[in-house]
Amino acid sequence: MGKNSASFDWVTILIYLSLVCFGWVNIYSASLGTSTPGSYLDMSEPYGRQALFIGLSVILIIVILAIEAKFYQRFSSIIYIIALIMLAGLFVFGKTISGATSWYAIGTFRFQPSEFAKIATALALAKYVSDIETNIKLISHQFKAFVIIALPALLIIPQPDPGSALVYAAFFFPLYREGISGLYFVLAISGALIFVGTLLFGPIWVAVAVVLMGCLSFFLLKKKKRPGIPLLLFIIVTSIGLSFSVNYIFNNIFEQRHRDRLNLVLGKEVDSRGIGYNTNQSEIAIGSGGWTGKGWTEGTQTKGHFVPEQHTDYIFSTVGEEWGFAGSSAVIILFTCLLFRLIFLAERQKSQFSRIYGYSVAGIIFIHFMVNIGMVLGIFPTVGIPLPLFSYGGSGLWGFTILLFIFIKLDSERLSF
């Protein structure tokens, strides 16, 4: 690791270790039934395999930190192209699991390339935006950056894996930091509100609301901040057009399971035994934990396996039941500290490449964290996004480990490139 090994950010590393270790503790509990547990390294159980994944992560960390920091910038384009090829290859060689063709399978070993495509996209975006010939404030250069982000997402959506594709919204954060207009964020939020509003109230009421808001913004805003009439008309017409296309998109492009999950979150359906079973049982488990929880391996919902996939996407329900409000808060605080630490580290970088990559890491972890916790609490629909460094799975753990420790390596040298 060389002369810079002492400059590795040990605060970030300690938070990483805390999340991984506490995650394994909860995976162990979520994997147990009413029978007597075997060895902690029992490879027939998820907790045994996760222990192996953690051990292999240590080897990955050593390799990542041993590689020269400039390597990650120099070969970012090649890494990105390889990631795209691997995603495209799923349509020919992929294995379908739980309705999604998102995996390569070699014997008992399974590999999910979308976890690593996020790393490749973060590197490629950092390389492009930091290029001396790139001015991210130009529309043409913004378009190229959006293409870099969109290509892997478009290969992931048809698998279908909308949850993994959703994570690519995280790349707005580094682009915003580097100077693109916040108008993109406003438009994205507005589009989402129009979509949800149309499902709840219908396109006519949404169209009326859009016209009223457009008129109010024109008459109430100061003259300097007031949008021009052509622009205002364009926004109103586009918004109304989107509203009237929502039902077609919802009924013809979304799959039935995605429609059901969204309807449940919006309160248009109540199905605690069918499509809403996971979320309902998760809420029961978390609610039963109280302030301090029932104790490790003592959760009745957890031991009874009432929450499907509890050691993967719904691992936070185990925390809520067995560790209560105190344990759940500790996990949320750890993630919050990690995010603020990553932003702090990103801001102290000497190179734009490292700063953009750091913000990408923070954005990816934030989206995963926010959506997963929201999903488990019933705030967001179930989309199959794991809790970073916490949920069971080799591809997920290795993907986040590589993502994070590349940045730790870049930060340790803080080169200007």
Image: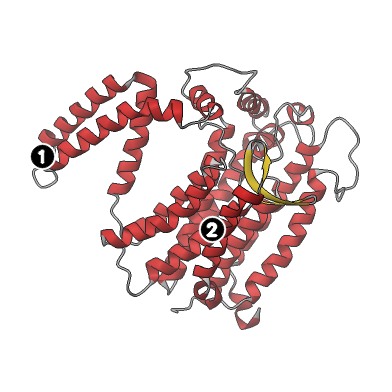
Tell me the kind of residue under disc 1: Ile
Tell me the kind of residue under disc 2: Leu
Cα distance, mark 2 to mark 1?
Answer: 43 Å
The residue located at (63%, 26%) in the rendering is 287
Image marks 2 and 1: residues in contact by CB distance under 8 Å: no
Q: Is residue 91 above or below residue 74?
A: above
Residue 210 - label: none
Q: Position of residue 313 (x, y in %)?
A: 64, 39
Query: Label 1: which residue?
Result: 229
Query: Label 2: which residue?
Result: 84
Badge 2: few (under 14), some or many (20 or more) residues near its Cα, within 10 Å?
Answer: many
Seen from the viewer's position, the closer of residues 329 and 56 is 56
In which quadrant will I find the N terminus?
Answer: bottom right
In which quadrant will I find the C terminus?
Answer: bottom left
The residue located at (67%, 41%) in the rendering is 96
Q: Is residue 315 visible?
A: yes
Residue furthest bottom in the image: 3
The residue located at (54%, 72%) in the rendering is 72
Q: Is residue 376 above or below residue 27?
A: above
Disc nearest the viewer among 2 and 1: 2
Q: Is residue 333 above or below residue 379?
A: below
Question: Is 341 on the left or on the right of 66, as rendered?
Answer: left
Question: Is 156 on the left or on the right of 175, as rendered?
Answer: right
Residue furthest front in the image: 92
Badge 2 marks a residue whose secondary structure is helix
Badge 1 marks a residue whose secondary structure is helix
Give the mark nearest the N terminus, 2 or 1.
2
Q: Is residue 296 visible?
A: no
